Amino acid sequence: MSRLVRKGLAAAAPVALALAGGVLALPGGASAAPLDYKPVTDQRLANPEPENWLQYRGNYQGWGYTPLDQITAKNVTRLVPAWSLSTGVSEGHQAPPIVNNGVMFVSTPQAQVLAINARTGEVLWRYQKELPPELSQLHPTNRGVGLYGDSVFVTTTDACVIALGATTGKVKWEKCVAPWKDGYYMTLSPLVAKGKVVVGVSGGEYGIRGFITALNAETGDEAWKTYTVAGPGDPAADTWKGDSWKVGGGSVWIQGSYDPATNLAYYGTGNGGPWTPDARPGDNLYTSSVVALDLDSGAIKGHHQYHWNDAWDWDEVSAPILIDIERGGRTIPAAIHAGRNGYLWTLERTKEGPLTFVEGKPFVYQNVFASLDPKTGRPTYNQEKIPGINRRAAFCPGLWGGKDWPPEAYNPKTGLFYIPSNDNLCSELAGTQAGLRKPGELYIGIPIDEVLNSLRLRDGVDKSKPFAIGAIQAWDPKTGKRVWTHDFQDTAMWGPLLTTGSGLIFAGGTSDRKFRAFDGTTGKMVWETRLNSGVTGVPSSYMIDGVQYIAVQAGWGVDADRMLNGLNAVLPEERRVSVAPQGGVIWVFRVMGEEATAQ
């Protein structure tokens, strides 16, 4: 877990641009050729055009799917860079390139947003907020912008939301939703719907009380605020003892999924704080859960807790993917989530909000759950696998889980659900009394040396031979069965997934810096290329003048880098993998020889 905390700003901005009041313009005062910008509406977000990529996962349901099918298993071997652009900063580049009518918007670490001609790579404008130099950034990253009207919305690690003019990059408004000096920060892409910009806060490791808030897209005024840690007045308040709710964690890292038909947004929440579960007896709602929120009021209409009184740092922050599946002769409006706790969860959504348990089964080795209640999905635990205050325990999967934040994907044509997974990695921890919380300081109740050295290999793994760690798995949600697995052997997998109308899957995520394409039906790798850095960015796809493009950010860092260091510490020297170099680059690919045609 190198670079656990980085302070201040990273590398300097690209030398080709010059600063002008927060917005960086081209040298000499020149401006890039303007493009025809098409305002983003609720209707377009609910029914996105195939040629655009308007939000984090392409649609409100979180599929990570493009209907575009020009790039196929037959011509993908001719996929070549159309253009690339250095971002000028280091650390983990995790945001998708968002594209609207030929204009690409990319956010990066250090509160930077780039507007780019998506056909040529020409920079139209660049914004970078000046962050407080004393700000400690536990996760110096950003997971994407939100679009609405003629505005671009971005969150920052000093817990602010900024609205920028889509054609100018100029600040329209700025709203700071919590004090960063108390440990609050934000990394997620905003969910934008019905005139609201919905965001959540991180900071569970600092003893914050998590929340989700909606801001007016025109003014930045707060529309509502809902805590993810139940306190006085909440029907789940009795799941916390004493004042433990005040520092209960429940971070929100990832944009929620949304169903316009029911007006419900679904968010995943992080673990409870401090990490030691005996410091906060009870189920600790709504941590390690999915919550269904009414978008108009923010009221929690339903929830499902994946595991109670979390002891393993298993944040369940990935929002569920919303699809309809056939089970038992009926159509189920499902919410499907591959958990950090190593279980694949299928829940049923209702129009009113409550979520009911359908199925849960492990997709990686898991030795903590003894059983699941067949009606509620509530797990019982193997007691010897629960670390606590002055109590050491080993458990699988480890701190980073069977799947961390990188999102899964669903392809309606193959009918398969795809998971970027990590197997055979465990952790061993023992806690101490957390003591008194000090604002802005780590408050986890685990000595930092314990965390840095917690990674273990699963008992029985033969270190002398290659064995499965990172993988892409394909599951059939109709049957609840695994269809295929593509293993990457010794390397971990930190690659968000993109699926296409031709049945391809695009993903990076491995420390060898490779970006790959797979046949989504068989799992066979059909193309790969090595980039400047490891790829933990969310891929996207768009079309201009009849040509399909695949876009992704390369830029290794944050938890992928930390896990790799821990993995190298437990592997034999001859099996260790090299650490991917840092440095952010936007890569855009197209099939060589495909001519542009007017559409």
Image (cartoon, rainbow, N blue to C red):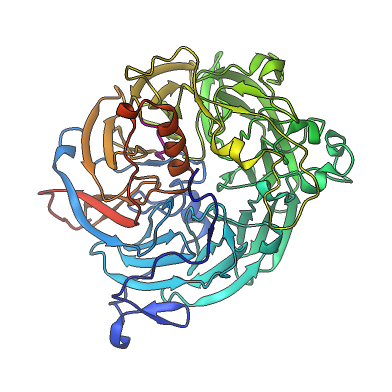
How far from the left and from the top, in percent, is residue 185? 62, 57
Spot occupied by residue 20 in the image (x, y as percentages of width and height): 42, 83
Q: How many marks?
A: 0
Quarter holding residue 586: bottom left
Residue 244 sits in quarter: top right
Direction from residue 430 to residue 509 in the image, left or right: left
Task: Using residue 285 as the reference point, say whether residue 512 is left or right of it.
Answer: left
Tell me if residue 141 is in the magenta stretch: no
**Figure check: 417 above or below 109:** above
Work out whether residue 187 can be spotted. yes
Q: Is residue 10 left or right of residue 505?
A: right
- Residue shown at 72% from the left, 41% from the top: 273
Residue at the farthest bottom position: 28
Q: Quadrant of the C terminus?
A: bottom left
Residue at x 39%, y 39% (from the top left corner): 495
User: At which x and y percent is residue 75?
Assistant: 15, 38
Q: Residue furthest left?
A: 593
User: For the stretch drawn in magenta, what is the main secondary structure?
Assistant: loop
User: Residues in magenta?
Assistant: 491-496
- Residue at the location (16% across, 56% down)? 596
Provide residue 356's location: percent of width, then percent of height. 68, 25
Q: Nearer the viewer, residue 150 or 589?
A: 589
Camera-side residue of 184 and 562: 562
Taking depth in this image into account, of 46 and 252 the one nearest to the observer is 252
81 w.r.t. 266: above or below: below
Q: Residue at x 85, y 39 (%)?
A: 237
